């Protein structure tokens, strides 16, 4: 068992220099971005969309994504339009998958794209890329495959697996810009909620008598159980943070994360405002933008909070924050010593980070210390803003 201390990975806002744009022939008026993964991937992909908007003013940016995330993309001006599919159907029987693919292709067939960029990079997304009929089709360079004849790629512009010499997954999604010779104008995701979404968030704060920059937003959920820090430890950390800072605490999350919220409420002694399942995904960035700090697991809301400009303490397990940590704001990523002894029993299936429970090893005081440290570090900026 390792005796080293948990790692605290601080973000570095500095980034790579841009390169001169080498424009491709022909006007680009409509761009399709194939991003069929999770909400955190879509947040990181927003930086790609922003740079494309700057390079091609007036171009229509269309995302292909899971139907659950359509409102988030359009309400926060990441996409002009969205073509949706149902991920649950794509993971169903062969017949269900075929039906969903046909419906998706039919929806895409209503458009005429000048450029299509596949940042999902699956067999299905590469198949779709070849059928949309775009003049410029951007995909990733082929990796090593034991069956190379099955790795069919229809892209006529090949991007590196990670662009600009970086390791963070953000630069996987920015790599197509480098392949196209487009200047990197915006290096990190930045979500600026609309006035209507901000008004909804402020009304919700007023309803619960919460002041702007006077609460910590806490997200105890994640897509996979192995990434979820224990609710009782969240409760203990919240009690200490509230006692030492006087800040209010707000729980956020989707309706299917209510169980974890209820466990926190049952264990904590601090009064907590529970907004889990109480606001739509498209309004969440506006709420997180009003928070003093975000505390949560390695998940989509963590990236959303960073993109909204809120300081972040992110909790990581086997997945490295070097590759997936929040970017663009002051952050501390807390991770237990690696390698760590397995605490998940039969649940752990390494090396898959989604099936490893390393985050469960984080102690309450380690997490609370990180929050207090980041609050102190960002206090000067807060006072200047006020």
Image (cartoon, rainbow, N blue to C red):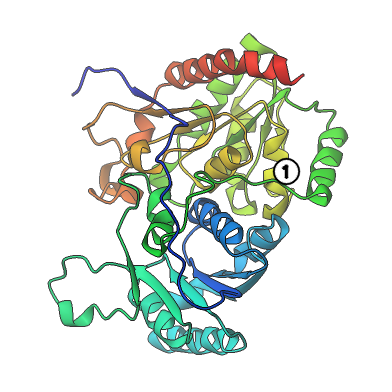
Residue that extends furthest to the left in the rendered view of this protein:
146
Compared with 242, 192 (above or below) is: below
Residue at the spot of label 1: 286
What residue is drawn where x is 50% and y is 90%?
102
Could you tell me which quadrant the C terminus lies in?
A: top right
Using residue 355 as the reference point, say whether residue 26 is left or right of it. right
Percent coordinates x, y for residue 375 in the rendering: 58, 17
Secondary structure under the numbered disc 1 in the rendered image: helix
Compared with 236, 76 (above or below) is: below
What residue is drawn where x is 59% and y is 18%?
378
Percent coordinates x, y for residue 24 in the rendering: 45, 71
Compared with 49, 207 (above or below) is: above
Q: Which image quarter: residue 140? A: bottom left
What residue is drawn where x is 61% and y is 62%?
69
Using residue 182 as the reference point, say whether residue 74 is left or right of it. right
Percent coordinates x, y for residue 240 in the rendering: 57, 14
What residue is drawn where x is 48% and y is 15%?
369
Could you tell me which quadrant the N terminus lies in?
A: top left
Using residue 5 as the reference point, say whether residue 172 is left or right of it. right
Percent coordinates x, y for residue 351 in the rendering: 23, 49
Q: Count the numbered circles shown.
A: 1
Circle 1 Cα neighbour tier, 10 Å, few/some/many (<14 / 14–19 / ≥20): many
């Amino acid at each position: 068992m390792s005796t080293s201390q948990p790692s605290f990975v601080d973000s570095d806002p500095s980034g790579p220099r841009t390169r001169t744009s080498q424009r491709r022939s022909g006007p680009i008026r409509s761009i399709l971005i194939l991003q069929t993964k999770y909400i955190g991937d879509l947040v990181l992909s927003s930086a790609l969309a922003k740079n494309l908007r700057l390079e091609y003013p007036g171009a229509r940016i269309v995302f292909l994504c899971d139907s659950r995330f359509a409102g988030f993309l359009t309400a926060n001006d990441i996409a002009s339009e969205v073509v949706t599919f149902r991920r649950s159907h794509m993971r169903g029987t062969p017949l269900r998958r075929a039906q969903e693919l046909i419906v998706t292709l039919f929806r895409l067939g209503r458009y005429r794209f000048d450029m299509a960029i596949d940042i999902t990079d699956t067999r299905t997304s590469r198949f779709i890329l070849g059928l949309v009929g775009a003049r410029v089709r951007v995909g990733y360079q082929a990796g090593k495959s034991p069956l190379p004849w099955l790795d069919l790629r229809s892209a006529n512009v090949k991007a590196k697996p990670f662009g600009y010499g970086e390791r963070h997954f953000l630069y996987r999604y920015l790599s197509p810009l480098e392949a196209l010779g487009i200047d990197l104008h915006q290096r990190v995701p930045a979500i600026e909620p609309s006035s209507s979404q901000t008004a909804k968030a402020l009304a919700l704060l007023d309803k619960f008598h919460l002041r702007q920059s006077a609460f910590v937003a806490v997200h105890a959920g994640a897509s996979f159980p192995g990434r979820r820090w224990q609710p009782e430890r969240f409760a203990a950390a919240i009690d200490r943070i509230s006692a030492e800072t006087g800040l209010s605490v707000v729980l956020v999350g989707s309706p299917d994360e209510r169980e974890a919220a209820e466990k926190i409420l049952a264990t904590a002694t601090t009064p907590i405002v529970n907004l889990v399942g109480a606001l739509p995904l498209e309004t969440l960035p506006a709420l997180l933008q009003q928070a003093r700090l975000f505390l949560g697991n390695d998940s989509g809301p963590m990236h959303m909070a960073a993109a909204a400009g809120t300081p972040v303490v992110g909790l990581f397990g086997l997945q490295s924050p070097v590759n997936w940590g929040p970017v663009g704001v002051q952050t501390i990523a807390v991770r237990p010593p690696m390698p760590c002894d397995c605490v998940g029993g039969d649940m752990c299936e390494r090396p898959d980070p989604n099936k490893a429970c390393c985050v469960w090893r984080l102690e309450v005081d380690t997490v609370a210390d990180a929050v207090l440290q980041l609050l102190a570090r960002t206090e000067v900026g807060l006072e200047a803003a006020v």
